[in-house]
Amino acid sequence: MRAYIALFRMRLMLEMQYRAAALAGVMTQFFWGMINIMIFEAFYRSSVFRPAMTMAELTTYIWLQQAFLVLIMLWIRDNTLFEMIRSGNVAYELLRPVETYYFWYFKLLAHRMSGALMRCLPILLVALLLPKPYRFVIPSDMLTFALFVVTLTLGVAITVAISMFIYISVFVTLSPRGSVLIFAVIGEFFAGLVIPIPLMPEWLRNFVYLLPFRYTGDLPFRIFTGNIGHAEAFQGLLMQCFWMISLIAVGRFLMNRVLNQLVVQGG
Amino acid sequence: MIELEGISKTYRIPVRSKGVGGAIKALFKREYEVVQALKGISFKINPGEIVGYIGPNGAGKSTTIKIMSGILVPDDGKCQIGGQVPWQDRKAYVGKIGVVFGQRSQLWWDVPVMDSFELLKEIYDMTNAQYERSFNELCDALELRSFLDHPVRQLSLGQRMRCEIAAALLHEPEILFLDEPTIGLDAVSKIAVRQFIRHINAKRGVTVILTTHDMSDIEALASRIMMIGKGEILYDGSLESLKRTYIKSKTITVDHHDYKGEVQIEGVTLISQGRERTILKVDTSERSIAHVVSDLTDQLSLKDVTIENEAIEDIVIRLYQDHQI
């Protein structure tokens, strides 16, 4: 455990060095969030039937997506790991007295959490002060908030477990481009990051509910906005546990397999 | 302590013929060439030894090191190090070894060296006292203190290599594998690294296996050398006996007073002859040096005589040639 905490600290220190990147991230996310809300507002105004999510819920949902982008986006990647695989420096990672899967899992987790810590507060603070319909609204009861925190934590755990497959695949393909693209496009669509899941047609929604992707960001954000009630939230939480455990188990199995066949070439 | 028996490893390398035609063919059918990197090598190394592991590029040195460090699984053969099989008990095993790959880095590029060390402390689960002791010893011996706060990317190669070696030894391993630790270093840094390896071997009793292409590394450090070529161990023994077996000739350089005649001595090859300097090569199995020198004094009025052994580099090149590698 000590190793993982130290890793986390290291990552946070590293992240704090990249101030400009954090600032640029905040600006981009803020801008992107505004545009998204404007587009949906136009749709809502001209819509003839009532969508499954109110405009106020949707606004908060989008701000949460933007503020916690680093936690849930599958295209967020740690290039140092890819570089390690490509260059063979991964040899040193295998020399550590830790299980490589968990070691990298925590590296990625730390990468995402430190990135989010630097970015989420400024975005949410500004969004709180905006006029309607752009305003970010905080839930009124504590249980909702607690459920949000727990499900978001599990959501990040699932995101990292899914993204581990990208890194595992790079051991075979040696190039991250294809994997990142496939995972990002498919995963993010099914996670509701392109179109919020409540706005999807019913047949698609039912399909999406069978996949792990919506348990990353969609569930916690909808709990926060009140779009998902407490009973359903608890159900979702159980599903999250199921996905987290199974994805990690499969990931570990595959990782150990590629590592056993791994050949680090050259001197 | 280290025991390898019949270790072999083959690599499958994708090949395709040149040009567009080859590329199209490879689209449908991949072809592989099987390269045998190790053909059943066996050796034993005792605790506290320093072993120089030499061989030309592609001979299988790094492959052996990787197998012994547990990051590569051999196809066949047995390997026991300190009672463990490296690739099977990897997690428990790697705490006992330190590895430096001279061409790779284990330090975090963007943060001060010190941060990398402290992370290693946690990864290897060291106590504060243990860490302080090891860290101070390494800092003093490798003279790291002046740049501990510099980010790794700002260090010179010599400074970085010293840090890499320190990082490999921080957790006080019993065995140290050094894969080309002096590659690219200047003379001063090379000497510093060698001195340090001797120091750590004497002080902590660390067993050291080092691969290198620099024969002066071997001469300065290793009492035992193993030579590998084409995946087989070709020589395993002391440096002295290698010299005894393979040094068959010595070169004599003679400075003398003006001499116009022709030097004629039995059993030597004349390499060059001038009016004031003559260079001869003596095959010591045919004629002893003493005899040759006494013949020389008879014929020439000597000013100075230098007798040189063949350089270790030349011996190694001859060994390679003898084995056609």
Image (cartoon, coloured by chain):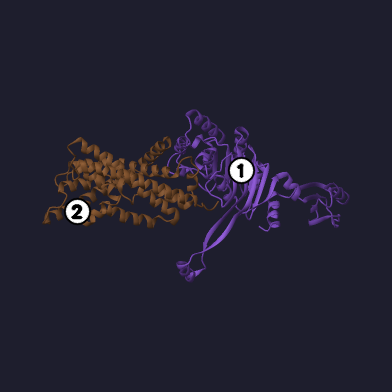
Chain colours: A brown, B purple
Please tell me if label 2 and label 1 are on a single chain.
no
Residue at the far bottom in the pictured view = B21
Mark 2 → mark 1, Cα distance in angstroms: 64 Å
Q: Which mark is residue A210?
A: none
Residue at the far right in the pictured view = B298
Kind of element beneath mark 2: helix
Q: Residues within 10 Å of mark 1 (few under 14, many from 20)?
A: many
Q: Amino acid at mark 1?
A: Ile
Give the number of marks: 2
Residue A178's image quarter? bottom left
Q: Quadrant of the N terminus of chain A?
A: top left
Residue A141 vs residue B242, the one in the foreground: A141
Q: Is residue B18 above or below residue A52?
A: below
Q: Is residue A29 above or below residue B134?
A: below
Residue A33 vs residue B35, the one in the foreground: B35
Residue A136's image quarter? top left
Q: Is residue B119 left or right of residue A146?
A: right
- Is residue B138 shown to the viewer in this render? yes
Q: Which mark is residue B209?
A: 1
The image position of residue B121, as x and y in percent, is: 47, 35
The image position of residue B279, as x and y in percent, is: 78, 53
Q: Amino acid at mark 2?
A: Leu
Residue at the far top in the pictured view = B129
Q: Residues within 10 Å of mark 2 (few under 14, many from 20)?
A: some
Residue at the far left in the pictured view = A48
The image position of residue B285, as x and y in percent, is: 82, 51
Which residue does the image show at 36% across and 54% down from the upper left? A180
Q: Which residue is mark 2?
A: A199
